[in-house]
Amino acid sequence: MIKLTLPVSEDVVRKLKTGDEVYLDGDLVTGRDRVHERVVKDKTFPSVSLKDGAIFHAGPIVAGDGQTGYTTLAVGPTTSMRMEKLEADFIRATGVRIIIGKGGMGAATAEACKKYGAVHLMFAGGAAVLAASEVVETSGAEWTDLGMPEAMWHMRVRNFGPLIVTIDADGDNMFERNKKRFAELKDAALNKYFSE
Amino acid sequence: MDEKKEKFIGALAAFTDYLSKHLPDDILARLKEMSDSESVPHAKVMYSCMSENLRLADETDRPVCQDTGLVQFFVKIGTRFPLIDCLDECFREAVYRAFKSAPLRPNAVEYPSERNTLTDVGDGVPYTEFELVPDSDSADVTVYLAGGGAALPGKAAVFPPGAGFEGVARFVADAMVEKGVNACPPLVVGVGIAGCMATAAKLAKRAALREIPSSNPRSEIAEQERVLKKILDETAIGPQGAGGSASVMAVNIECACHHPSSLGVAVQFGCWAHRRGRIIFDGDLNAEVKSHGGFRI
């Protein structure tokens, strides 16, 4: 088990290996499809720097408003693969080092992780209250015009995890390897039952 | 009439709120079984996250998953059910109330403006499907919170009938390996077989909502459910696609007759947080909940 505090340096990130179990402390932001589009396509940047930081692919349920303060009620990961088309450019543009989400990501993201020194970590999908219980403060939101799930939320987390490294900064991609293995096992199972 | 309407809407709203925060008893039992028999280390980590998450959701009265889905109702409706003329209004109001009270995440997005209605109600949302029951004044309602992740790998196609069970099995297994990882396994797999794409898809949904464990009443279909489950488990996708010794909670198949020249096949997946509940109303709008032993109105 590895404990990291955000922001993280390139050196620290490059030591992580696929399969490692990680817990995070510090500030992160949420961002999914529309946040990626804003940064990469519209070249609009959020008010906080993401350099050496972490982005969580998640669309939370948040209670409260800007006046009374926010409480994150549930914030499980969303499918990271939807951001695959834009993630490499997002890493390059922001200097983000840790991407958190559900499932794995593709070759372009793995290549960018290797080039810029970043990693992708998975959080258990659907474990949204567990994740919310590890959010100690929800300090604000921007781009709320995108709606609650798509806005960028600023959160402080403590003992955020367990997270499993699925892409490391060598570009090793656990889900790509798994996907090949699952496909081989599937073909073997089908051929066994339908051989005659 | 207004009193009955209020009773119906109030119970539906309270139940929808409750089932966003608690999984049905049969799913809890199956998850526990699968977790107890799992030995792969990453898979064990995932199961312990799920069980801790369920404990926290209950303790803090929060939705199990932030994706509270689009609410859907599948109703066996008596032709003499007292509220039969205002069902649409009742279901919409119930969803709106659950959205406010739970709260559910605003998930109804208009196409193509991408505007979120911010109420979980909109054109065609909530989705409702009815089966008429003659000579009855009751309503047997299955409520389902249809999440986005579980919808993503869903697929339908039409084959020549010669494709047979092998064609069906390959189609389902391919869909699951292609995108099932992101649907939050272990999955519920609903398969529909009928004459065209739309009818097969409807049956696939019905299959995904069947109780667990249950078998198709026709023994040759029950045998296909058993074989397909074995094949899908052998993919070793495991919980959350982290690898594991079992990957599906159930495989349920529903079929109708097909056309001599076309075999429609559809597959509908459900995530581990399978938020499905069943509530039955009698003619006086007294409710009985079948799926969640802990629910009280």
Image (spheres, rainbow, N blue to C red):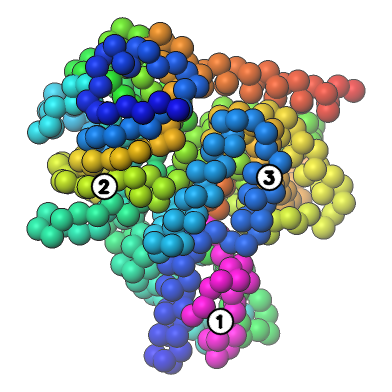
The chain letter under disc 3 is B
Please name the residue shown 80% across and 43% down the image.
Answer: B226
Mark sitting earlier along the chain (1/3): 3
Residue B173 vs residue A139: left or right?
right
Q: Where does label 1 land, which residue?
A: B287
Do the dots labelled 2 and 1 sit on one chain? no
Residues tagged by mark 2 and mark 3 found on one chain of the structure: no
Q: Secondary structure at mark 1?
A: strand
Q: Which residue is mark 3?
A: B36
In this figure, what is the number of numbered marks? 3
Residue B152 seen by the camera: no
Q: Quadrant of residue B243?
A: top right
Q: Is residue A134 visible?
A: yes
Residue B244, image x and y in percent?
64, 31
Does A41 sit left or right of B64 as displayed?
Answer: left
- Disc 3 element: helix
Is residue B221 inside the magenta stretch?
Answer: no
- Residue A61 vs A81, above or below: the answer is below
Report the residue at 16% width, 46% height from top.
Answer: A139
Which is the main secondary structure of the residues drawn in magenta? loop
Few, some or many residues within 10 Å of mark 1 (<14, 14–19, 20+)? many
Q: Residues within 10 Å of mark 2 (few under 14, many from 20)?
A: some
Kindly identify which residue carries mark 2: A136
Quarter assignment of residue B164: top right
Dot 2: element? strand
Residue A167 point in image, percent of width and height: 43, 18
* Residue sitting at x 27%, y 37%: A30
| On screen, residue B156 above or below B8 | above
Q: Quick one: quadrant of the N terminus of chain B? A: bottom left
Image coordinates of residue A48 in percent, x first then y, are: 12, 32
